[in-house]
Image (spheres, rainbow, N blue to C red):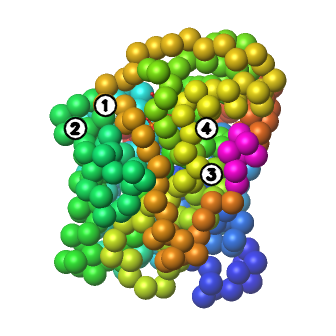
Amino acid sequence: MKHGKGPEARKRIVITGGAGFIGAHLCRRLLAEGHEVTCIDSFRTGRLSNLDPIATHPGFRIIQADVTRFETVGLDPADEIYHLACAASPPHYQADPIHTMMTCVVGTAAFLDYAARCGARFLLASTSEVYGDPEVHPQTESYRGAVNPTGPRACYDEGKRAAEALAYDHARAGGVGVRVARIFNTYGPLMRADDGRVVSNFIAQALAGRPLTLYGTGLQTRSFCYVSDMVEGLMRLMGHPEPVLAPVNLGNPEERTMRELAETVARLCNVPLRMAQHPLPKDDPHRRCPDISRARSLLGWAPRVGLEAGLAETIASHRQAEHRAAPQILATGTREACAVPSPG
Ligand code: UDP
């Protein structure tokens, strides 16, 4: 037995965006469970350092490639594809909006074709952003959303909506075993300090003794899911034995205002709360909270890590990162065995 799993149980798994925040946690967990994992990442927002502890694992391969230009024909067949590739933080996905839209559409189309060719299950990492600035609260999967199709968030929101449509077209036309996870705000170790999202911003600012940047009144809400809970939810959704013909919300329904989050982060970092107010970005959703009834009944899944416990872990990992040397590019030992198309 290789890597602790028999050949039937050991799956060949492709993770696009595997060097990103959630992707790297997923790579680590799937390798620890004995699977063979191929990570495909452009390293535009993902980081090689996220893969440090597993980079030389014999069951792991890294392919540096942009999914919008990747030729999947050369890939070995896979049993499962987790399609996570896409910048997910508003400042990052808005920095190159055309590329974001192409990643969602062209990248998803390429990997759905690959799934159809090799008979793999395909999990699309979609997003709560498909609900836009919702008028229904909490958001159920049947709610069709209120997205501004021409605003600065559209590249991501509409991109992911198109990706969902493509996925279900492949399921209907080609029988691809599609799963769509609508991922709500997720946080935890391995988030970049410069990610730009609220949790990492507040922690980085508090630890640096700077005021926390509060956008708008700070009364807008989000519901934050710790990354280990998210990874568990994604794996359960992928592992569900029956076809899953509708999207599934994954997130933590504990809803907080951004003011409450700022107070909690400052308290856990042991610093006095100081805030600097900034304008609310255009189309910033006012409320967001998942209804997770479907995930509970279908997958027996619910988040287990509360906000304070998860923030404490995240703050500890940010503190450690501050003291670590700058990440180095690794010689992975397995990388040269892969096709490495020129980075996009
Ligand atoms: N936000 C904030 N300060 C920051 C970053 C974000 O107040 O430094 C707010 C932002 O306006 C939004 C919420 O926090 O209302 C969550 O933003 P984030 O970018 O984390 O994710 P989103 O849910 O908007 O995709």
Q: Is residue 110 left or right of residue 195?
A: left
Ranked by sequence position, the earlier of labels 2 and 3 is 2
Using the numbered discs, state the Cα–Cα distance from disc 2 to disc 3 in whole angstroms. 28 Å
Indicate which disc residue 227 carries. 3
Q: Which residue is mark 2?
A: 148
Q: Residues within 10 Å of mark 1 (few under 14, many from 20)?
A: some
Q: Position of residue 184 (x, y in %)?
A: 48, 50
Using the numbered discs, state the Cα–Cα distance from disc 2 to disc 4 in whole angstroms. 27 Å
Residue 27, can we see it?
Answer: no
Q: Quadrant of the N terminus?
A: bottom right
Using the rendered view, name the quadrant where residue 270 is placed.
top right
Judging depth in this view, the residue of 246 and 196 nearest the camera is: 246
Residue 247, can we see it?
Answer: yes
2 or 3: mark nearer the eye: 2
Using the numbered discs, state the Cα–Cα distance from disc 1 to disc 4 in whole angstroms. 24 Å
Q: Is residue 290 above or below residue 21?
A: below
Disc 3 CB within 8 Å of nearest ligand 1 atom: no
Q: Is residue 71 above or below residue 95?
A: below
Q: Position of residue 257 (x, y in %)?
A: 54, 34
- State yes or no: residue 310 in magenta: yes
Disc 4 CB within 8 Å of nearest ligand 1 atom: no
Ranked by sequence position, the earlier of labels 2 and 4 is 2
Q: Residues within 10 Å of mark 3 (few under 14, many from 20)?
A: many
Q: Is residue 120 left or right of residue 214?
A: left
1 or 4: mark nearer the eye: 1
Disc 2 CB within 8 Å of nearest ligand 1 atom: no
Q: Residues within 10 Å of mark 4 (few under 14, many from 20)?
A: many
Ranked by sequence position, the earlier of labels 2 and 1 is 2
Judging depth in this view, the residue of 194 and 186 nearest the camera is: 186
Identify residue type, mark 4.
Met
